[in-house]
Image (cartoon, rainbow, N blue to C red):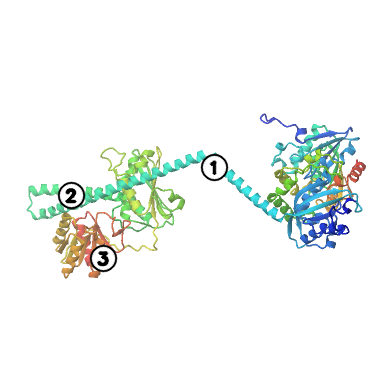
Amino acid sequence: MLDLEKPPVSVLRRNNVHVSGSGEKAMMFAHGFGCDQNMWRFVAPAFEDEFRVVLFDHVGAGGSDLSAFSHQKYATLDGYADDVIEIARELEVENGIFVGHSVSAMIGVLAARKAPELFEALVLIGPSPRYIDDADYVGGFSQAQIEELLEFLDSNHMGWSAAMAPVIVGNADRPELGEELTNSFCRTDPEIARHFARTTFMSDNRRDLADVPARSLILQCSEDVIAPKAVGEFVHKAMPNSTLVLMRASGHCPNLSAPDETIAAIKSFV
Amino acid sequence: MNQQRPPPGSADATAPEESLEDLYENAPCGYLSFLPDGRIVRANQTLLTWTGYGREELMGQRFQDLLHVAGKIYYETHFAPLLRMQGFFHEVALDLVCKNQARMPVLVNATEREAPFGSDRFIRMTVFNAVDRRRYERELLAARKAADEASRELQALNATLEQRVQEEVQERIKAEEALRQAQKMEAIGQLTGGVAHDFNNLLTVIMGGLETIGRQLTNLPEGTDTGRMTRALNMAQQGAQRAATLTARLLAFARRQPLDPKPIEPNRLVSGLADLLQRTLGETISLETVSGAGLWKAQADPGELENALINLAINARDAMPAGGKLTIETSNAHLDEAYVEALAEPVPPGQYVQIAVSDTGFGMSEETLARIFEPFFTTKEAGKGTGLGLSQVYGFVRQTGGHIRVYSELGHGTTVKIYLPRYAGDTTAATGSLPLQSGPAYGGDETILVVEDHEDLRAYSCGVLRDLGYHVLEAGTGRSALEMLQASDKVDLLFTDVVLPDGMDGRQLADEAKRRRPGLKVLFTTGYTRNAIVHNGRLDPGVELIGKPFTFDELATKVRAILDRG
C-alpha cells in the first residue's frame, strides 16, 4: 500500500546507489560500520571491465537519505539486508556477486538467505557473526568491552563527531586523493553511528551461516582487532560452501590497506 | 636538505642537529611514527614520559594497542580508513592507555607520509595532551544536556500549560466548594447549637415546672378538675419530651451533645437492633444484615449509634414506598492518607469500622446530596419529617471522630457508609460512668452544693433536690460556690453547670473544690459539650455528667448513685 502522505523515496536515491562498469553480471559492494561506498575506491574499478559494479551507502551513512533512517527498522541487521534486496531487485540483479565488508558480510548472508536468486557468490571481508565471546565461541570482545564501547558512545561523541567532518585539505604525499571524496567519508550523524554500533556489535548471526545457498569467499586479515582469525575460521566451518583465504594484509580494511591483494583474491574466486 | 642548513641569524652553525633532536624529543606534544599496520617505529621522549613506557617497550607495539576497546574499534572502523582515504586526520579525540593502565585523553593528528622504514609509507602522528580540554568538554556536554532538558521541560510545560491551568482551576473550584460546604455546616452548627442550648435550658425549666405540678396534683383531692389537669399535664409533658428529643438531635448535629463513647461490637449492636428496625421498616421492606468476619470493636456512644441507624432506616423506608430491601453491612476499613486528605472535613488516617446502610429506593440527586446533612432540610412532605434525622447521624459521626460518606444514584438507591474509629483498647472495660438506671427515685439527707448561673434552672434543680430531702446550698458563680464551700463544714456533692460566668468554669471550680476537699463528689451538667470538661465531645474518664434537660427521676437516680458509690 502506498502511503500518499509520504511519497516513497526511490530505493536508488535512498541508498545513494551508483552503477558503473560494462559487464553482464552484477557485483555489489557493501561498506561496513564507519564508512561509506568510497572505501571501495581502490578495489571496485578493477572489476568494471567484467562486471556491472553497484556501489551504495547504507541508510545513515555517506550520501544516503538520512530521513529514511528508522531506529526500529535498523535495530537489527535484517533492516539493512532488506535494503540490499530492494536495491538488487530494483537493478534486476540475478546470480550476482555480493562483496560485503565487516558487518556488511553478515548483511549479505542474511540477504542471500532471504532472496537466494540474487547472488550466486558472496565475498565476505572480515566477517563476524558475533562480536561478543560466548562460552566456547571466541568473538574477540567480552560482554563488558562491548558495553564499555556503547557506554562510551553514549557519553562522549563530541570529540569524535568533530573528527567526522574533517577539513578538506590536499595531502602532497597522497596526490591520488581528490577533495570530493572526503566530503562525506566517515561522516555520520553521531546518533545514527551510535545506533549502528549497537546493532552491529550486539548482533548474533551464527545460526544464519549454515544454510546459505551461495558459495562464499572469506577474506581474513592478519591482526584484525575487529574480527580475529578464530572468527574467520568459525565462519568457514559454519558455511558449507566456503573458501577461507588468510591475507597478508593486517588490520580490518584490506580493501584500503591492501587493495591489490584484495582484488587478486576476489578475482581468483569469481 | 633544507633542515640541515643553519637558520638565518644562528650564532652556532655547528649544533643545529643536536637542537633539532632536542626539539623533537622534548616538544610540548608527543610524536609517534608507525607503519601502515600500526607498528610503532619511533616515539619522542614526551610521549614516553606521558605514557610511562620505555622506548624499547614501545617499539614494535601497534598504535592500536595503546587504545582502549572503544578507541580500538573506532580507530579500525573510522580513523584508519579515513587516514588511508584522505591521507590525514586532524584532532581526533582518543584515550591512550598508559603503562599503569591509567587513561590519558589526547587529541591526535596523523598524516601519511611517503618515506622509507622498509616500507613505502608511514604514518606520523602528533599527540596533544587533552586532559583539561576533555574535562571542559564533559562539563560543556553536561551543561548542554541540562540546558536541553530544561528547554524540553519548558516546551512540555508550555504545551500543557492551558490544560494544566484548567485542571488547576477545576481543582481550586472543587476545593473552594468543599471549603464552603464545610464552613456552611460549621456555621449552621454554631447557630443550631446556640439556639438548641438556650432552648434546652428553657425546656428544663418547663419540664421541671410540669413535674412539680404533677407532684402537687397528686396531693389534691381527685375530681373533674384534677382529671383534666392531669390530662393537660401529660400532653404538656409529652410535648416537652418531644421538644427535648428534637433539641437533642439539633445538639447532635452541632456536635454538642454529651457523648459517652464505649467500646462496642457493631455486629452485636446491629443484630440487637434488627427487630426494632424490621418493625420500623414495615412488611414490604426486607432487612438483611451482613456481618463482617473478625470485625473490630468500635469506639462510639452505643445509644447514639442506635439512633443513627434508626434514622437511616427511617430515611431508607421513606425512599422505598413500594417496598424494597435494606442491607446493613459491617466490615473493617482502612482509610489511607490519600483518601482522608481529599476530605473536606478530614479525619486521621487509620483503622475504622464501617457500617454501611443501603437501600433500593429512588436515590437522590446531586443537589439533594449536597444538602442532606443540613438541619431542617427534608425532601419529605410537610409534616412527614423533621429534617433532623441525617443531621443527627452526621453530627454524631463527626463528633465521634468518624467519617460519613453517602453514595446515591437516582432510581437505584442510596448507601450511607459510617466509619467509626476502631477501639484502641483490648477488652470490654467500660468507662467510669455509671449506668443510668431508671427506677424509683429516692432521696437522702446529704448536703449538695448546686452551682448554676441560670436562675430558673438553679431553682428547678434545687427544688428537685430539696423535694428529695437533701440539704441544698446554691451559688450562681464559681467564686461564690468556693466561699460557700469554705464556710460550710459538710458538703457531700458538688452539682455544677460546666459553663459558668466570671472566669471560673465548672471544671476549674471542681478542681479547686476537690483540692480543698479531697474526696468531694462532683456531678456536672451541661447542655452541650464544647467546654473544658469534655474533650472533643467526650467525657473525661470518671467524670459524672447529666445532660440537660434532665427529669426529676433522672437527677434523683444519678445523684443517689454517685453518693452511694464508695
Disc 2: host chain: B
Identify the mark nearer the N-term, 2 or 1. 1
Indicate the amino acid at tag 1: Leu
Indicate the amino acid at tag 3: Asp
Indicate the amino acid at tag 2: Gln
Select label 2 or label 1 by which is in front.
1
Secondary element at tag 1: helix
The residue that mark 3 highlights is: B511
The percent coordinates of residue A253 (x first, y second) are 84, 47
Select label 1 or label 3 by which is in front.
1
Identify the mark nearer the N-term, 1 or 3. 1
Select label 2 or label 3 by which is in front.
3
- Looking at the rendered structure, which numbered label has been put on residue B377? none
Identify the mark nearer the N-term, 2 or 3. 2
Disc 3: host chain: B
Q: What residue do we see at 24% from left, 68% from top?
A: B514
The percent coordinates of residue A195 (x first, y second) are 71, 45
Residue B13 visible in image: yes
Taking depth in this image into account, of B536 and B70 the one nearest to the observer is: B70
The residue that mark 2 highlights is: B237
Taking depth in this image into account, of B65 and B537 the one nearest to the observer is: B65
The residue that mark 1 highlights is: B157
The percent coordinates of residue B451 (x first, y second) are 19, 60
> Alpha-carbon neighbours of circle 3 within 10 Å: few (<14), some, or many (≥20)?
few
**Can you say which quadrant of the picture contains the C terminus of chain B?**
bottom left
